[in-house]
Image: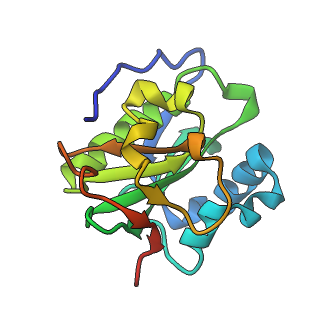
């Protein structure tokens, strides 16, 4: 189950966390390329995002004035046994501002929003030691598979609703839109 932890203070600059808007799109792509490189588009998670728009109510950005410091996005996916499931990612923080609580703030705020909007579960590919503090666990995604190569230890799940992933199984599929 999702458990909230307080983010670190965001100092010494002024950061505003807000819903992503269309004018952020170019800066988001540049930041994600900076953090993950252009080869990111070859990763398995992008197969689930291809041709599907991110959930506009959950995409968030952290800005200092007009400078984009961080972003997080979510995508609807189809998971048998877990009908209201999201794929988290990417989450990207400008390298000059990593370790300052921006990622935690984006994560906590967006997960709270997802829960409030009625989403039941979230999956992602990432480092469990980092994502565990937000409630993500490998055990919650053990009965699921992704449509391409991925290190199983990095495939994690989070229940926003108790038991949401208990009956989930099989291949995660791109949502039909």
Please name the residue shown 26% across and 67% down the image: 83
Q: Position of residue 130 (x, y in %)?
A: 55, 27
71 and 24: which is toward the camera = 71
69 on left or right of 2: right
Please name the residue shown 60% across and 61% down the image: 45
Q: Position of residue 124 (x, y in %)?
A: 50, 49
50 on left or right of 131: right
Q: Position of residue 156 (x, y in %)?
A: 47, 43
156 and 6: which is toward the camera = 156
Against 168, residue 9 (above or below) is: above
**One can see residue 149 in this view:** yes
Against 12, residue 46 (above or below) is: below
3 on left or right of 17: left
Q: How is the protein colored in the picture?
A: rainbow
Please name the residue shown 59% across and 15% down the image: 12
**One can see residue 55 in this view:** no
Q: Image quadrant for the N terminus?
A: top left
In this figure, what is the number of numbered marks? 0
98 and 135: which is toward the camera = 135
Please name the residue shown 66% across and 26% down the image: 98
Q: Image quadrant for the C terminus?
A: bottom left
20 and 79: which is toward the camera = 79
Q: Position of residue 153 (x, y in %)?
A: 58, 39
């Amino acid at each position: 189950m999702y458990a909230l932890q307080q983010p670190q203070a965001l100092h010494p600059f002024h950061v505003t966390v807000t819903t992503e808007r269309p004018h952020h799109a170019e800066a988001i792509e540049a930041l994600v390329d900076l953090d993950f490189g252009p080869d990111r588009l070859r990763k398995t998670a992008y197969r689930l995002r291809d041709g599907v728009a991110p959930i506009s109510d959950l995409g968030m950005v952290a800005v200092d004035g007009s400078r984009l410091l961080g972003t997080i996005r979510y995508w609807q996916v189809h998971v048998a046994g877990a009908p209201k499931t999201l794929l988290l990612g990417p989450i990207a923080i400008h390298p000059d501002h990593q370790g300052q609580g921006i990622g935690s703030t984006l994560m906590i705020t967006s997960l709270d929003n997802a829960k409030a909007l009625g989403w039941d579960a979230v999956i992602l590919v990432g480092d469990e030691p980092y994502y565990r503090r937000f409630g993500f666990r490998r055990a919650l995604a053990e009965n699921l598979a992704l449509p391409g190569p991925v290190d199983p230890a990095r495939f994690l799940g989070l229940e926003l609703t108790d038991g949401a992933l208990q009956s989930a199984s099989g291949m995660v599929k791109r949502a039909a839109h």
